[in-house]
Image (spheres, rainbow, N blue to C red):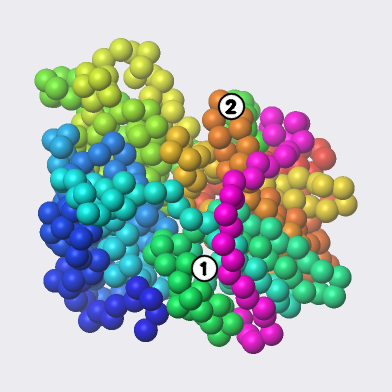
Amino acid sequence: MPVGEVAARPGGGVGGMVLGGGAAAAAVGGDDAVVMQLAAAEGEESVITVNCPDQAGLGCDLCRTILEFGLRITRGDVSTDGHWCFVVFWVVPRSSSIKIRWASLKNRLMSMCPSSYSIPFYPDISQPGPPKFYLLKLLLPDRKGLLHDVTHILSELELLIHRVKVSTTPDGRVVDLFFITDGMELLHTKERQEETCSTLIATLGHSISCEVLSAEGFQQGFSSLYPKIAEELFRVELVGSEICSSSLSAELKRVQTATINFDNSLSPAHTLVQIICADQKGLIYDILRTMKDCNIQIFYGRFRSDKKGSVNKGCREVDLFVKQVDGKKVVDPEKQEALRSRLKSEMLHPLRVMIVSRGPDTELLVANPVELSGKGRPRVFYDATLALKALGICIFSAEIGRQTASERQWEVYRFLLDDSKEFPLANSPTNRNRVVDRLPTIARSVKVNGDGTCRRFI
């Protein structure tokens, strides 16, 4: 059985099992700090409950980790008194092809719960150190969809990709360099390294070469974009013609709007923030990370799912009772408008996408804002490679880097695409639009320039 894998009966919860117990469990007052009730049948929701001491941004961190494991959060409840929190997420797998490692997810969530008291004999629990980076080197024959297949395997192994350099040799082989961290923090062991390489070889074939090395001194690389492209990609706001284009369908116009209201009359101590917007992948995460970065603390939150017969069909309704970091309500109209504007931007346009010409070649750019904590959006690389695989487009090279623009840091994914007779890209705005459309988030707006540059906020 692979490292971190625990068998569970269909429909059986894992809350009664000792998963990640011991010192880590004791640090948060017992193994019941994280309880999971697995769905009884495919398509039904599983329930994840977290009951532990609170800390700033914990809800966002829990949500990001759940998304990293390939789950979609359908609804949620969050409550805290500022010292202790109670969080419930209802989740379903994003795809039937994704294997959820529930035991490992529970251990990861347990490790994120703050300790209720210090444990001098377990400094690694009380004060977690920085993640250790590793270099995964792969040499293998090229084929369509290869990069996504590797990414899928690494995701199931809980190996998080921080940087990748992919290049194709003249003899048709691919050299993949992945700078990764291990969610299980076991990649320094021979057993974990052998599990990683054996899983890759078993899935991709015995003709590949696999090696795991320590990457001491690794630093996140910075992406170098042409100034004109960077200006277009990171523009703070879309101009009116791009947002309100009459060529957009009624469905696109509906999903690119959001209603955000503030109410200070219902609670003497909290401001009620009410949000209604189209549902989309990662919406709860986008709301929580925005509140975290804006130093807004959520004391009670309810994220309702779209129910059949709902007045706002296809929309997500969110109620949040919040305070500022100084403990005061959000009363100032200017602060309300600033928070409203930031929430709309992050909810409606969590990703920036461009397709540009790089000499005779075509390059796909995908960018997302980085949290103030330095962490990027989960599974963007996975989604982008999946979209390209579905279209049958080969990736000649790929890179992940960081770039500072618009007073914030961005994570930039760059894919140099192979132009083929079956799917030409160089002189086909239609095919370029199809590439962007296949990204698994609804496109919000589009602009195709005269030079064939395609730009979307999604």
Question: x%, y% of residue 225?
Answer: 73, 38
Looking at this view, is 112 or 410 the one in front? 112
Q: Amino acid at mark 2?
A: Ser
- Where residue 67 sits, quadrant-wise, is bottom left
Give the SS element for disc 1.
helix
Looking at this view, is 170 or 332 the one in front? 170
Residue 257 seen: no
Looking at this view, is 347 or 64 the one in front? 64
In the rendered image, the vertical position of residue 74 relative to residue 205, given as above or below: above
Q: Residue at x 18, y 71 (%)?
A: 18
In the rendered image, the vertical position of residue 270 relative to residue 230, given as above or below: above
Looking at this view, is 194 or 2 the one in front? 194
- Where residue 66 sits, quadrant-wise, is bottom left
Indicate yes or no whether the magenta region holds residue 225: yes
Question: x%, y% of residue 88?
Answer: 21, 52
Q: Quadrant of the N terminus?
A: bottom left
Indicate yes or no whether the magenta region holds residue 151: no
Q: Amino acid at mark 1?
A: Leu
Answer left or right for 95 relative to 127: right
In the rendered image, the vertical position of residue 395 relative to residue 196, given as above or below: above
Which residue does the numbered mark 2 point to in the structure image? 406
Q: Residue at x 39, y 49 (%)?
A: 129
Q: Which circle marks residue 390 in the picture?
A: none
Answer left or right for 403 relative to 28: right
- Which tag is nearer the camera, tag 1 or tag 2? 1
Label 1 Cα crowd, 10 Å radius (few <14 / some 14-19 / many 20+): many
Instruction: Tell me where the magenta segment starts and ends, as one range.
Output: 203-232
Q: Residue at x 21, y 41 (%)?
A: 54
Q: Residue at x 83, y 53 (%)?
A: 361
Which residue does the numbered mark 1 point to in the structure image? 154
